[in-house]
Structures are given as structure tokens and as C-alpha cells.
Amino acid sequence: MFSKSLKTTLAASVLATSGAAPAVADNLGAALVGSIIGGVIVNEAHKNRARKQPVTRKRTYSPARAQNRETQTALNYFGFQAGSPDGVMGRKSRAAVAQYQGHMGFPATGQLTQYERDFLVSSYSRAQIGGPQVIKAMQGPNGVRGLLRTWRDEATGTRSAGAGGYGSYGGLPFEVSEAVDEIAASADPSAEQLLQRSGFMQLADLNGDGKNDYMIDTSVSGSSFWCGASHCSVMVFASTPQGYQRNDFMARGVTTANFSCHQGVCRMSDEPASGTVQAAAPTPAPAPAPGGSVGGTVLASASQVAAPAPAAGGLAALQLFQQPAPAANTASLTSHCSKVSLLTSSNGGYMTVSNLRDPELALGEQFCLTRSYAINSGEALVAKVQGVSQAQVDSQCDAFGPVVQPYLAKLGSTGSDALVSDLQKFVLQSNMSIEQLSNTAGICLFSGYRRDNMEVALGAALIMVGVGQRPYAELIGHHLAQGFGVAKSPEQAQGWYQTAIAALETGSEPVFAPGQPERLALIKAASAGLTGTIAQPVPASSTAAALPSFSTD
């Protein structure tokens, strides 16, 4: 009865619109009705409601208390126990602040300066993105607390070989040893075992300075973290007077002969190995400071690739580079977020409204942050499903992509309002309850992002918006703005960003980084900066017809 009434509400909201939903909507029932994922979660949620009915109390929003809750949450995450994040900086919170200050070498006053708070909160947000560095820290003696000193030293340029718990192997340069540790943190073999694997590390003098340069092929590690659908991350370290500079590529089956370097900057050679592409970061790296690079890391760009000479007897090699660019970015989003994390570290933390220099990079940071939140939320939902393997979850989630493909195909040509209306009709004909569909989509966001399957992730995000959870439209805006899983279109992204912004401004509960009150203003400013114009807000009538959002908490 509960689900039936929700569907009645949804039907009323789209009754005035004409045209039938695509016939493919009928396939959703065949693919997901009786879903072992959504069904079990709904049952668990109903059991929890039967055991205890929560008492809801209306809270008055206060920017100061919201910032305090954000501070308390960050303190608790790094092991400085501030108690429940209630927004009141009492004795326990002040003691936690003093512990944090003492750990960082700041004066232990119990009162945070603006810099101390900004560094704490931005470090917490960065840690939520995850990655090998965070995984490595969790396994170290200081836990995630060790990240604070590591990132402080990185920001000030005083990091030593002992920072962050990284070691050196067999006389390898520190920068290379650190990368080995990063890869080992996301793979089963230890760092020592990786170094013994044939092809994992290759040495050559790539820049002609008489010193060894290093190439690491992560495909040998067996870790999916560093690999996309067809290529894996390849790291090339070139020697400079200041140390070794890292260059990142996406490739497979390469050797040192495929690369050449000038000082610390490397590029693919004129005749790359078959199946090799150079990684092009969707967000441009900030211009390097005079005499050096950003954070000692250079992201490889397509402009650094020399055009190959035509192959003898044909134009096959030339045609590979003269073909139109692919419709969507085929690079790994996981790998991209690792690079964004490096840039965030190099810049001293996340971009804010006050220091918004590069809208695309700012949105890239927020994209990776929302991806992390979606993974964490979906993982919590999966934990409620008993007796179902991860392979079964992934198999069910793979049904999302083909079923919503007609809507994915419209993302580049149809406005957000029209597509949301089509999605609502689709949901009505899915033969699943709203709650079951919402929970299944939440799990499939986790499954899609975990496996770098953009079709599943985008499909799940569309379903979330279709059932009325409009803040998830931000994810679709990010995909369109960055070009992951769909053709890059900053203009089309505007409508989806505005859908999410309008929902949040009219009282919808934030689903991503709820403790960051400035985040909404940052999304507005950065999305407008993509096209140089302020997008028109979504009409009030569009948000008024939105379905209510329900949680399984």
C-alpha cells in the first residue's frame, strides 16, 4: 500500500505530460523485479522501523553550528575525539582541538585559527576520496592521523623520505619507492614482491643526462585500481637536479623504448606500441611555478604526443590519430581521481569560492568527492543484504546500463527537465516500488564506480533523479562536464547542475558532503564558469513536482 500510494503520487505529477515512456521500461521489471538487492534492503528497512520509530526534531539551521559540526566530524575522523558532532564546541571539542594542534606542532590553545581549521577540514575531505595513500596510512602505526603531517609537509615542500611511513627499496629514489608503496597498498603482493616481478619496473636513461630513469607498469601488479577497461597506469620517473619527476600515462604492453624525456618532462615516442594511448587528463593541470612543476608531478597531455609517421605500405598508423575523438572519455575515472588528488595536494587543498581559479578542476575535485560519497553510501546498503555475493550484486547492477540506454543516449541532446519527465514515466512502468528502486540504484552507484563501469553508474544516477532524489543530478552534471561515460558537454551539464542546486536551495537534504555549507556556492560558481555564463535556474514548477525522498536509516 505504501509503494502504491507513492506511485499514485508520481503518476499525478506526470499526468499532464503527453507521450508514452519508451517500451524499454517494461524490461526493467524483467531485469530487476524481485531484486535480491532492493527487496532485501526494503525488508530490512521495514524491520528496523517496526523495532523503533525514530523521533524527529526540527533543527534550526545555523552556519556557525554547521561549521562546528564539520570541524567535529573531521576531528573524530583523525582520532581526536570531539564527541558527537552537535555543533557546540564544548570542553571535549576544545580538548580534541588542542590534541590536533599538538600533533601538528601548532600552539595547543584549544581554539582553531582559520588556517588550522581550513587545513583540518580540507584534509578530511581529501581523505574521503580515498586512494592508495589513505589505504597505506590506515595500515601504518599512526593510522589516518599520519596523513595530516604528510599533507602538511607536501604543502610546505618539506616532506622527507620518512614522511608518511614510506621507505626506500634497494637504493631506489624516494619518489620511485613512494610510488611502489602506493601500488602495493591497492594490490595483494607486497612492495618487495612487486619489485621481483618481471616487467614491473624498467630502467633506462630517457633524458640523456647519464642517470637512470624509471618506468613502472602497474598492469603487472594485478590491481584493478590502476587500470581502466583496456589500459593501465604507467609511471615514468625522469631525473632532474631537484629529484625525480613523475609523468603519468595510460598504456598497456609498453617498454622504456616507447618514451623519451627532456629533463623531467616525458612523452610517448613517435611509434608507440600497439594498444598504447597517452593519458589526457580531463581537467588541465595548473600552470607550473617558474623553475618547477606543480607538486613535482606532471600530467601527460595529448599535446605532448608527436604525430606518428605513416607506416610503410599503408596509412593504418596515421589513421589511428586522425580519427575523430571518441564520444566519451574512455579513461579510468578511478585513475583520474588519483591524479586530481595529487593536484589538490599540490595546490594546498580543495578550491573554494574565494580562490576559484580553474572551474573545471574545481568541479573535478567535487566529482571525485561525490564519487567517494556514493561508494561509501552504497557499501553501507550492501552490508544490509545477507547471503548475496559481490558478484551477484554486480551482475544485477549490470542490468541498469542496457535498460536505461535510451536515456543515456539523450543526455547530450535533451534538456534535463524533459529527460527527468521521461524518467518519471519510466519509473512508473518499472513494476518496482519507489523504495526498492531507490535502494537498488544506490547500491548500483557503488557497483558502477567501484568497477569503473560508467554505464552502470550513470544509469543508477538517472534512476535516483527519476524517483525524486534531485540532488543526485549533480552526478550527471559532473559526467557531462568531465566527459566520463558520455560525450563531454559543459552546456548540457548546466541544466543538471541547476536541477541539483534548485533542489538543495528549496530544502532537499544534501547527499554529498553535507557538512560543507560553502559547497553549494562553489558548485554554482564553478558550473557557471564552465561556459562563462550564468545558467538560468530551474522553474519552481519543475521542483514542485518532485517525489519525496526516503531513506533506509
Image: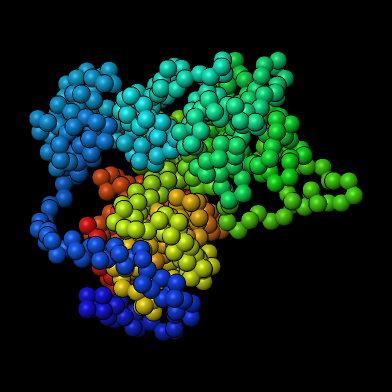
- Image coordinates of residue 103 in percent, x first then y, are 26, 21
Q: Nearer the viewer, residue 527 or 300?
A: 300
- Image coordinates of residue 379 in percent, x first then y, are 35, 51
Which residue is located at x 33 percent, y 31 percent? 144
The reply to whether residue 495 is visible in this rendering is no
- Image coordinates of residue 60 in percent, x first then y, are 12, 52
Taking 469 as reference, is 457 left or right?
Answer: right
Taking 395 as reference, is 109 left or right?
Answer: left
Q: Residue furthest front?
A: 387
Taking 20 as reference, is 75 left or right?
Answer: left
| In the image, residue 334 above or below residue 505 | above
The reply to whether residue 390 is visible in this rendering is yes
Specify the quadrant that holds the N terminus. bottom left
Q: How many marks?
A: 0
Q: Residue furthest right?
A: 313
Q: Nearer the viewer, residue 528 or 140?
A: 140
| In the image, residue 168 above or below residue 90 | above
- Image coordinates of residue 229 in percent, x first then y, are 58, 51
| In the image, residue 355 above or below residue 540 | above
Which residue is located at x 18 percent, y 60 percent? 48
Q: How is the image coloured?
A: rainbow
Q: Nearer the viewer, residue 336 or 172?
A: 172
| In the image, residue 70 above or below residue 245 | below
Which residue is located at x 17 percent, y 41 percent? 85
Which residue is located at x 29 percent, y 35 percent? 121
Specify the quadrant that holds the C terminus. bottom left
In terms of image quadrants, where is residue 264? Answer: top right
Q: Nearer the viewer, residue 3 or 282?
A: 3
